Image (cartoon, rainbow, N blue to C red):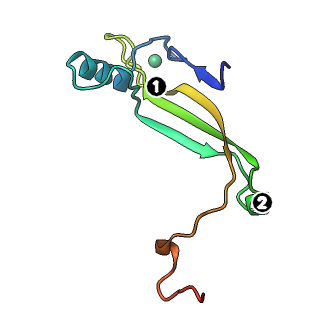
Amino acid sequence: MENGVILIDKCPVCGSKRRFVEELAKTEKEEGRMRRGLGFCTHIIRDSVVDREMVNQMPYGTEIPLYEVWMDICLGYPDKPCGNIYAVKIVKDTATKKPKLEMPGDQMPGQFNQN
Ligand SMILES: [Zn+2]
């Protein structure tokens, strides 16, 4: 893992490097409808690894591990479609616990501040 990023450059089932959404994005870039630096995949899963019952007891400033997984669909070879959905990029990150700012919209109907 380099800088918290794992790249998986080929399908773990068939070994193809062709991916469905990535190829759609390549076409859009070639046609000039998309910036070259953008990456695309079917979906990204981003979440934290935290015990949600215990996080309230942790002090502000506590580092919480985060992960991000980019998924895409293997195209396989033209004569042998694969269709395997797999992680093409895995990112390990962290977030810092911060106090939640109370916004007026956060209040329940009927609630009000007394001061
Ligand atoms: Zn495959």
> Which residue is painted at 49% across and 89% down in the image?
110
On residue 36, the disc is none
Numbered label attached to residue 54: 2
Q: Position of residue 77 (x, y in %)?
A: 37, 11
Does 67 appear above or below 3?
Answer: below
Q: Quadrant of the C terminus?
A: bottom right
| Secondary structure at numbered mark 2 | loop
Q: Spatial distance from mark 2 to mark 1, Cα to Cα?
A: 37 Å
Image quarter (top left, top right, bottom left or bottom right) of the N terminus:
top right
The answer to whether residue 17 is left or right of residue 21 is: right
- In percent of width and height, residue 48 lies at 65, 46
Q: Is residue 15 left or right of residue 54?
A: left
Q: Choose between 72 and 92: the one closer to the eye.
A: 92
Crowdedness of circle 2 by 10 Å Cα count: few (<14), some, many (20+)? few
Task: Where is residue 52? Give x, y as percent.
Answer: 70, 58
Q: Looking at the image, is mark 2 or mark 1 earlier in the sequence?
A: 2
Q: Is mark 1 within 8 Å of ligand 1?
A: yes
Q: Quadrant of residue 69?
A: top right
In this view, the residue farthest toward the left is: 31
Q: Is residue 64 left or right of residue 21?
A: right
In terms of secondary structure, where does tag 1 sit? loop
Residue at the spot x=65%, y=35% of the render? 93
Q: Which residue shows up at 25% across the image and 19% down it?
A: 27
Q: Quadrant of residue 91?
A: top right
Q: Which residue is mark 1?
A: 84
Q: Residue at x 74, y 51 (%)?
A: 61
Mark toward the viewer: 2 or 1: 2
From the viewer's side, name the closer residue of 114 and 110. Answer: 114
Residue 9 to residue 61: above or below = above
